[in-house]
Image (cartoon, rainbow, N blue to C red):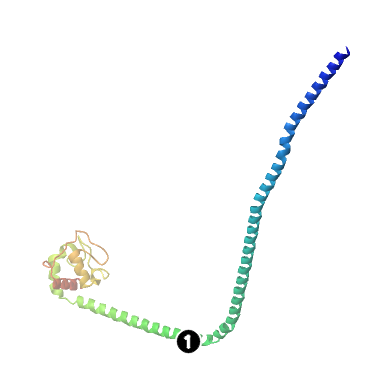
Amino acid sequence: MNARIRTAGSVLSWALGVTLGVILGVAMLIVTPRLMAQPNLAATGEGQTEASGTPSGGESGSAGAASGREAAGSNETGDAQGDQGEAQDSRNQGEDPASAEGEEPTDQQEDAGAGSGAAGEQAAGAAGQGDAAGEAQGAEGAAGETAGDTEGDTEAGRQVYASNCAGCHGQQGEGALGPSLVNEEGVQSWSVAQFTATLREGRTPTRQLSQAMPRFSEDQISDPQVANLLAYIKTLN
């Protein structure tokens, strides 16, 4: 009986020892890799921090340097603009006396301008007088031309009228099929050239006549006969 108890105790002790050994072995297998991985992770983290920190610091330094240069450039630009403004003010202040001196001969310039204006008015007046004289001479010439145009043979003109005009305008120009010719503002006021245009082309000084008015060629009524005819018509009343 005692032997059996000792044997059972020995088996139990062996089983406990084996179980403890297995547990310890498994624990070592689990804990050891983790303990070994922590230093590696720490080293890797430090390396990444150093790798990432170095460029960031460099970039920040570069950006700061660039900002400093821009600020310095802005300051230099402001200084240059300030210098230019001061120079401009100096020039403006220097120009004031010159401009004041330039205003002194204003009276002389006004006198010269007034003299030029008076000369211009005199020239314009002389030109106006010349134009008036030219117009008067032109009117006299036109009157003389009209008088010369009407210098025709009224008796010869009466014969031309009786043969070519009396049938439509009446024996005394009083009008029949055609209008009256006795009108100081009508045919009797025309020049030979105007009367010729009416006979040849049917065109009066104011309008174009219809085809009812015959067109006379030079073979039918010559230019001297036209002058005679107009001289006769101007005697009708």
User: Residue placed at 67% from the left, 50% from the top?
Assistant: 50
Q: In this view, does 188 lie to the left or right of 38?
A: left
Q: What element carries label 1?
A: helix
Q: Name the residue under label 1.
A: 112
- The answer to which of 187 and 210 lies nearer the viewer is 210
| Neighbour tally class for label 1: few under 14, some 14-19, many 20 plus, Cα within 10 Å | few
Name the amino acid, label 1: Ala
Q: Position of residue 179 (x, y in %)?
A: 22, 63
**Which of the 4 quarters of the picture holds residue 29?**
top right
Quadrant of the image for the N terminus?
A: top right
Vertical comparison of 197 with 25: above or below? below
Quadrant of the image for the C terminus?
A: bottom left
Q: Is residue 212 left or right of residue 65?
A: left
Q: Position of residue 114 (x, y in %)?
A: 48, 85
Q: Position of residue 112 (x, y in %)?
A: 47, 87
User: Residue placed at 22% from the left, 72% from the top?
Assistant: 191
